[in-house]
Amino acid sequence: MIKRDFKFVVELATEFFTQEYIVQRMSLIESKDISGWEIWLQVEFAMFLEQHIAVGEWIREFQYSMDMRSSKKQKYMAIDFLVRKRGAKLDQYIAIEIKQNKSAASCINGMMKDACKISLVKGSEDDIRTMWSLGIHQALPQEDLENLVNSYADEYEVQLGPNCIKTKPIENTNFAFTVF
């Protein structure tokens, strides 16, 4: 299940970031040094999911109660996207958290913090089948990025799925996306 869900999320991200108008906008964001575009990206991704043939359902910013034994500060948290594959059980979702940062290190750090946050969802409300982070950042070689991801995973004590780290450049930009 983990490998299938990982492959599905990587395929969604790959399709999304190969759309010509998304590449054009990413190129403009880069050339004009625009910051704070994560919400725009999430809205575009939502429209993409709505039309995708393999997506049975998606929910944006779904609120979960947090386990107060582990999280003393927050009662609730929102997950960027819950996605149910077409044909999957109605009550099982793939969670996707999206981060964007020009710096690959800062982006990966934020992705790890999100992974820790997801682990605090109250068990009685947990319908998350698997959880994935999708980060958009400056491109780095695959090996360098995997080392960065593994370093932060060790620091935050996050268990990553085996062979479940993928980075792909976004064509005609200096950006890349990473899924883990």
Image (tube, grey):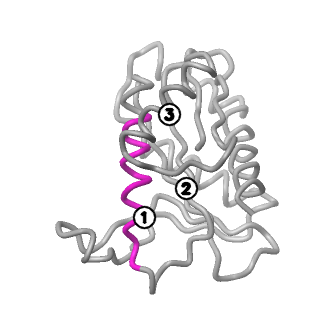
Query: Measured along the vertical axis of the image, is residue 61 above or below residue 75?
Result: above
Amino acid on which the number 2 mark rests in the picture = Ile
Query: Measured along the vertical axis of the image, is residue 78 above or below residue 26?
Result: below
Residue visible at 50% across and 78% down in the picture: 126
Say few, some or many: other residues with alpha carbon within 10 Å of mark 2 (under 14 / 14 to 19 / 20 or more): many
Residues marked 3 and 2 touching at CB (< 8 Å): no
Measure how far apart labels 2 and 1 are at the Cα level: 13 Å
Task: Say which label, 2 or 1, has the lower sequence index.
Answer: 2
Res 119 label = 1
Q: Is residue 54 left or right of residue 106?
A: right
Q: Which residue is mark 2?
A: 96
Residue visible at 64% across and 30% down in the picture: 167
* Magenta-colored span: 108-122
Res 141 label = none
Q: Is residue 95 left or right of residue 152?
A: right
Quarter occupied by the N terminus? bottom right
Amino acid on which the number 1 mark rests in the picture = Ser
Measured as percent of width and height from the top left, residue 163 is found at 69, 41
Q: Secondary structure at mark 3?
A: helix
Task: Say which label, 1 or 3, has the lower sequence index.
Answer: 1
Amino acid on which the number 3 mark rests in the picture = Val
Depth order, front residue of 131/56:
131
Q: Quadrant of residue 117?
A: bottom left
